[in-house]
Image (spheres, rainbow, N blue to C red):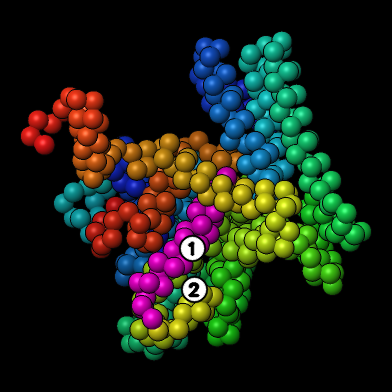
Amino acid sequence: MFGYIMPEKPELKIKEYDIYRAYYCGVCKSIGKRHGQIERMTLTYDAAFLAMLLCSTLNIETKLVKESCIVHPIKKSFVTYNEIIDYSSDINIILAYNNIKDKWEDDKSKVALVAMAVLKKSYKKLMVEHSEKCAIINKRLGDLSLLEKAKCDSIDAAAEPFAKLMEEVLDYNKLDDKTRQVLRWLGYNLGKWIYLIDAFDDLEDDIKSASYNPLLTHFKYNGSGDGISEFKNQIRGQIEFILLYCLGEAAKAFELLATNENKGILENILYIGMLSKTDKILCKRSCGKGEKSV
Amino acid sequence: MVKVKNPYEVLGVKQGASEEEIKKAYRDQVKKYHPDQYQDNPLSKLAEEKLKEINEAYEYVSGKGQTTKASNGWSGRSAAAGSQGSQGSQGGDESFKQVRMLINNGNIADAEALLESIPNKNAEWFYLRGLLFMKKGWYNEAVMNMKQAVNMDPSNYEYRDALNKMNANSNVYRGNANNRGYGAGPNFCDMCTCLWCSDSMCECCGGDLIGCC
């Protein structure tokens, strides 16, 4: 996960903001308790969304406790704990480990090697605890790296493994079949959106480092002519269409879930946060690096 | 999900809401889960169930009289939408009909295998391939195939309609987001333009809004 799934803070109520933070901090502290303090640095917003979505689907009431935190030692803030939060923190570690492993295989950076060593112990433990999920996630990431090596030129084919991976992540197996079917379609579309928005976001870097990027191969970027900004202008419309289609399908799936708890926050993320992220990355609304953390 | 739901909750209104409120909520819900919205979506069956639940809830909440009419109205339309899809093979050969049937039954893998085995790659072939990609979530391939179908047979209403619907779909999402407050409030540029326009229009009519220009 890459942290693209965020709420639109100005549109949240203050109460909702506190609850969102409680989930975010809950996942962070759960990582600390279950895996270790340094591992907390891998936390992403996506994991907080996963926790909140599943809790809402399972109708788990949000119980807030006020605690202090080593990151902000003086100010106490709200936190919430439950088994879903633990599940999300496990998934966060599994994906973070694989992400770092992928980085190390790409560029052999020492930083990645150290990070891998730190996460290795927790990852091994999780491979036993979530053996099924880990096996599928590994399979999908294996498919992805094969496609990348073959320089796959279909956007949809390249995005498929990650979409299928997210489908698996959202499919929490204690739910009934119908709900799981809906969650899988929601996950599939979120995964596709994440993969493609990340590909668009990385265009400049991938050109510089001559790395694989499905958008470069699909639209046959040849490096000549007016360069990257012209290339982006040419493909922007089509990419926007696909990204919004994914979000539209994800939203349709979401509307079929029996969510009650924290519905407003989830709607904020799915309808406003992710659209605003899309617009920002496609550089439609305001260009610039003015991204603020939540 | 199995438990019996409170019909007011299903409609998203408070118990004791006025007739107008109930009607509006019902209309909004029907719009949201309408078969047209979920036409090429793998969750269409679940959306149909949800719509049924909403219809039943509305029937319960508002008393029998008018509701049978309303619920029949919608279910009638949904059946029409379904049959439209299966009738559509204008003069196509037997295998295309079979592919359509497999798609309607949700048997995507078999439909795909059968379609790939058909050597005659005409407009209908590309249209069906587009439909299959749609169901799989391969939106880019879907659009490319649909466009190909429309290019090969520009006069076919079914193909053009499918392509238009796809294009409309992402606008629906943006519309929903706008309704929730995304992008609300004019930006500075809009306000200036608005003032400038108003001023010009006033001047056209002989008046003036901003005295200095």
Rendered position, B173 above or below A13: below
| Camera-nearest residue between A227 and B57 | A227
Residue under label 2? A215
Image check: A19 left or right of B4? left
Task: Name the kind of residue labelled 2 in the image.
Answer: Leu
User: Which secondary structure type mostly characterizes the magenta part of the structure?
Assistant: helix
Residue at far bottom of view: A108
Rendered position, A196 above or below B88: below
Image check: B1 left or right of A281? right
Q: Residues within 10 Å of mark 1 (few under 14, many from 20)?
A: many
Q: Are marks 1 and 2 in contact (CB under 8 Å)?
A: yes
Where in the figure is residue B121, as x and y percent of width and height? 79, 69
Task: Name the kind of residue labelled 1 in the image.
Answer: Ile
For residue A189, say whether it is visible.
yes
Q: Residue at x 74, y 52 (%)?
A: B156
Residue under label 1? A239
Q: Is residue A237 magenta?
A: yes
| Camera-nearest residue between A106 and B119 | B119
Residue at far right of view: B94
- Residue A65, numbered label: none
